[in-house]
Amino acid sequence: MCMQTSCGVCEKKTWRGCGAHISSVMDKIPTDQWCTCVPKTVVGTTEFPPKVGEGKAAK
């Protein structure tokens, strides 16, 4: 199960967990509050923030 959490790099919202429920977690959060780190996690045609602990600051 995936859950909302905060990124330790940019301090915005991201996700943690198995990866199967990313959209159900992130769809509840306004995109301007999403983690801005890279690389993005792609599900279908949507780019989501990286899993907590896996992202690096975007340049």
Image (cartoon, rainbow, N blue to C red):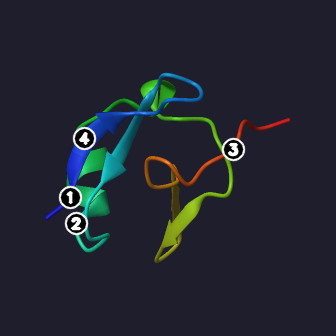
Sequence-wise first label, 1 or 3: 1
Name which quarter of the figure residue 54 lies in. Answer: bottom right
- Residue type at mark 4? Gln
Q: Position of residue 11 (x, y in %)?
A: 49, 22
Alpha carbon separation for disc pair 1 and 4: 7 Å
Residue 36 percent across, percent down from the top left: 61, 35
Q: Disc 1 or disc 3, which is closer to the eye? A: 3
> Number of labelled discs?
4
- Residue at numbered disc 2: 21
Q: Which mark is residue 56?
A: 3
Disc 2 is placed on an element classified as: loop
Residue 5 higher or lower than 15, as above or below: above
**What is the x, y in percent for residue 23?**
30, 59
SS of the residue at dot 1? loop
Q: CA distance from mark 1 to mark 3?
A: 20 Å
Amino acid carrying mark 1 in the image: Cys
Image location (x, y in percent) of residue 17: 25, 61
Marks 2 and 4, the one that precedes in the sequence: 4
> What distance separates the C-alpha of mark 3 from that of mark 4?
18 Å
Task: Measure the C-alpha gap from mark 2 to mark 4.
Answer: 11 Å
Residue marked by disc 1: 2
What residue is at 46 percent from the left and 25 percent from the top? 12
Instruction: Say which residue label 4 marks.
Output: 4
Quadrant of the frame with the C terminus = top right
- In 3D space, how far apart are the residues under numbered discs 1 and 2 (Cα atoms)? 5 Å
Q: Earlier in the sequence, mark 3 or mark 2?
A: 2
- Nearer the observer: mark 3 or 4; the answer is 3
Would residue 54 appear left or right of 22 to someone viewing this image?
A: right
Which residue is most to the left?
Answer: 1
- Tell me the amino acid under the disc marked 3: Lys
| First in sequence: mark 3 vs mark 4 | 4
